[in-house]
């Protein structure tokens, strides 16, 4: 763990130095902690270097080399400017960061990552299987089967390749020099990346509070405490802090905050910061594509309707990472292969010619058109068109899953989102929902300054288009697919929530009892949210994951029995390594979760994904025979006499069976396998071939 802490410290230190450098180069006003800006720039820089190797499925050693080079340069720069960094961080606000980080470590130690029923194995396997891989991304992220890319949505997130680099770099002293023991990938990925998220998010939240220029210290302290210890402690921001997807909301907040400051402070260079934030968000999560699109669409509407000078050019700078990402994504679309090169030609043509006289005339015509007709286009034509298209899909394509009714599903049951519509929330959440919507209404009614009017435009655009139940079918169909509801994070995120509550405080400035009551409510939400998590209450912020945490090793996040079984399997594969030549992967059936984070190069025929996504199963009957049988399910009725036939047909080499959960399969496979080890929960078997 010391090596992980050291690596995290180096990343944060380099990020702080990079942020300091960006402020100097872009001539930005000092804005509190520099590490969030530096980390955004680091992700952007790494992603820019990673794109070629991602596109051509090249060697991971390119990622190692470019990462070492970039971090090495940043480390030298940061050391040369360590005095300035120290001065920026020697501040009372640093106590907030330290306290938040300490609480994060305490809570994360006690939670589990629900590796059997979440996306955790996918992301952890993604990181692990790319380690020392000569052809990155040429495998199925769940099963590990090599030879082909998986979903294009996950191919161009440099954040996970940075995680691969981190796993490699932390273990270099052990693997190359024999210094210390090797740290398992699952520990580095969950703890290392999780710590980075905790520190970066905490610093950014404190920057938000300072950026709002809140004069009353008590209000600022309560807002910081509430956002740090409540909003930033929703279960996915703890248990899944290592996900790139967790940065989705944080960087949406950062993008909105930067646009807010850009309009308020007239600091033109901040448009480049917005560009970097968009690039960093795309490097972390494919969902950030439509999240940032919704924000930038609203910003463009505001700029055009407000007749801002250089609106088109400024927007073209900010959306540059979106343009690059779109070309990369469409390059993998075999159904419409002409789209990627067409977009590439258009974008290259525009960005290389935009300073020429005739291109400036075209831009001027475009700006004049949107200045004149922007209001009717953005607030009438586009929303009405999307509602009509939604109606068409709902009535003429009845098989489409994401219809009007889907909007009202309880999305927090299966995704990292909250319910803000008073439908599925408990009473304490609904108290907050009431406060949130009061703040939204106040901003819609009372916005006066330029930056507040932008927030007003943003909220209106969300309500009439991206979160309008009459239009979201079209949003899903054309842009966001089944996760369109995540755009609610544009409306409610760490920055907008802080702003909303601050607006309420300002509105009731003369009513001291209202302000005190609101501060008490926010403080109570923090206390109850954490305390209830330890008492099996739905009111808790992370109750389910605390309960699950009692069943796993707190460092590895899986049970000790699973770790033991996986290590036995590892020794068997090492024993039989001469069998795996000519491209045959060790092929396994495993009831132990997380096996591929330890053994990333095995082919696991059935994974956690097959439980929900039945169309992914290589064989339905084989799956029913071989899977875990959970105690809440009906007794098994399958014909287990066929078990050995399936093992031979799919060339299975090893089994890890929870014999007390699927005893029928355990007995049926005795005829064609040898039991190597029996533990309190598992049998590890070698299949006879």
Image: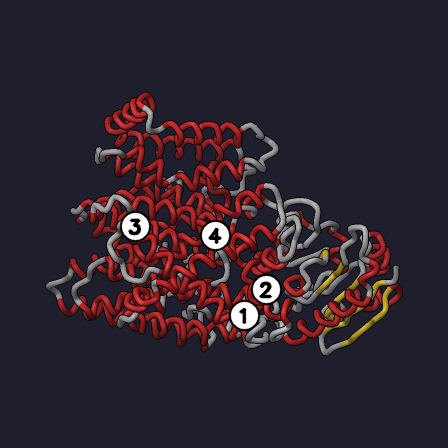
Of the residues tagged 2 and 4, which is closer to the observer? 4
| Residue receiving disc 2 | 115
Asked if residue 353 lies left or right of residue 62, the reply is left
Asked if residue 394 lies left or right of residue 375, the reply is right
| Residue receiving disc 4 | 284
Q: Would residue 456 be visible to someone looking at this image?
A: no
Q: CA gap, disc 4 to disc 1?
A: 22 Å
Q: Where in the figure is residue 298, as x and y percent of width and height?
A: 32, 40
At numbered mark 4, what does the secondary structure look like: helix, strand or loop? Answer: helix
| Residue receiving disc 1 | 112
Q: Where in the figure is residue 65, as x and y percent of width and height?
A: 55, 54
At numbered mark 1, what does the secondary structure look like: helix, strand or loop? Answer: loop
Of the residues tagged 4 and 1, which is closer to the observer? 4
Q: Where in the figure is residue 135, as x and y percent of width and height?
A: 65, 48
Q: CA gap, disc 3 to disc 4?
A: 19 Å
Which residue: 54% across, 59% down? 163
Of the residues tagged 1 and 3, which is closer to the observer? 3
């Amino acid at each position: 763990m010391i090596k992980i802490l050291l690596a995290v410290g180096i990343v944060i230190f380099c990020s702080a130095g990079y942020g300091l450098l960006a402020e100097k180069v872009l001539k930005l006003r000092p804005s509190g902690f520099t590490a969030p800006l530096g980390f955004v720039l680091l992700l952007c820089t790494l992603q820019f270097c990673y794109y070629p190797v991602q596109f051509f499925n090249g060697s991971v050693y390119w990622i190692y080399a470019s990462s070492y080079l970039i971090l090495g340069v940043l480390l030298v720069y940061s050391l040369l400017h360590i005095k300035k960094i120290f001065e920026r961080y020697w501040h009372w606000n640093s106590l907030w960061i330290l306290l938040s980080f300490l609480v994060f470590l305490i809570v994360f130690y006690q939670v589990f990552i629900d590796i059997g029923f979440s996306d955790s194995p996918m992301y952890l396997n993604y990181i692990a299987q790319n380690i020392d891989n000569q052809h990155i991304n040429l495998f199925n992220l769940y099963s590990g089967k090599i030879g082909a890319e998986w979903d294009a949505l996950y191919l161009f997130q440099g954040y996970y390749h940075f995680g691969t680099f981190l796993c490699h770099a932390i273990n270099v002293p052990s693997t190359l020099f024999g210094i210390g023991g090797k740290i398992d990938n699952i520990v580095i990925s969950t703890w290392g990346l999780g710590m980075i998220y905790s520190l970066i998010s905490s610093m950014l939240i404190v920057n938000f509070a300072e950026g709002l220029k809140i004069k009353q210290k008590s209000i600022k302290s309560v807002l910081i405490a509430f956002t740090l210890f409540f909003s930033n402690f929703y279960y996915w921001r703890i248990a899944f802090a290592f996900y790139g997807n967790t940065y989705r909301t944080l960087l949406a907040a950062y993008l909105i905050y930067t646009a807010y400051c850009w309009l308020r402070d007239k600091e033109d260079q901040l448009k480049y910061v917005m560009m970097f934030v968009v690039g960093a968000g795309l490097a972390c999560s494919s969902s950030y594509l439509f999240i940032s699109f919704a924000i930038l669409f609203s910003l463009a509407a505001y700029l055009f309707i407000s007749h801002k000078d250089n609106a088109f050019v400024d927007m073209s700078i900010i959306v540059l990472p979106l343009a690059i990402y779109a070309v990369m994504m469409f390059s993998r679309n075999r159904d419409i292969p002409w789209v990627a090169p067409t977009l590439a030609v258009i974008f290259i043509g525009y960005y290389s010619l935009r300073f020429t006289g005739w291109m400036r005339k075209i831009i001027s015509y475009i700006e004049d058109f949107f200045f004149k007709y922007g209001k009717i286009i953005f607030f009438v034509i586009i929303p009405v068109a999307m509602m009509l298209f939604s109606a068409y899909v709902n009535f003429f394509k009845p098989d489409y899953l994401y219809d009007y009714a889907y909007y009202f599903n309880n999305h927090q049951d299966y995704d990292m989102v909250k319910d803000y519509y008073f439908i599925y929330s408990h009473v304490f959440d609904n108290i907050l929902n009431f406060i949130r919507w009061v703040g939204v209404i106040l901003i819609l009614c009372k916005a006066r300054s330029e930056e507040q009017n932008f927030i007003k435009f943003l909220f209106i655009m969300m309500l009439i288009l991206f979160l309008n139940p009459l239009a979201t079918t079209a949003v899903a169909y054309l842009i966001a697919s089944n996760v369109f509801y995540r755009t609610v994070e544009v409306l409610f995120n760490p920055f907008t929530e802080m702003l909303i509550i601050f607006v309420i405080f300002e509105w009731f400035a003369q009513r001291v009892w209202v302000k005190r009551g609101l501060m008490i409510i926010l403080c109570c939400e923090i206390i109850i949210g954490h305390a209830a998590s330890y008492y099996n209450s739905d009111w808790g912020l992370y109750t389910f994951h605390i309960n699950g945490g009692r069943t796993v090793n707190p460092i590895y996040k899986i049970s000790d029995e699973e770790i033991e079984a996986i290590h036995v399997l590892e020794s068997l594969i090492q024993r039989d390594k001469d069998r795996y030549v000519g491209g045959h992967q060790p092929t396994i059936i495993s009831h132990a979760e997380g096996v591929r984070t330890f053994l990333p190069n095995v082919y696991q025929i059935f994974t956690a994904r097959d439980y929900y996504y039945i169309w992914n199963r290589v064989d339905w009957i084989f799956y029913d025979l071989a899977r875990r049988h959970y105690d809440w399910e009906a007794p098994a009725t399958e014909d287990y006499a066929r078990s050995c036939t399936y093992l031979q047909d799919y060339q299975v080499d090893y089994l890890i069976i929870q014999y007390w959960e699927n005893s029928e399969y355990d007995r049926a496979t005795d005829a064609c396998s040898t039991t190597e080890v029996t533990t309190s929960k598992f049998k590890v078997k070698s299949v006879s071939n």
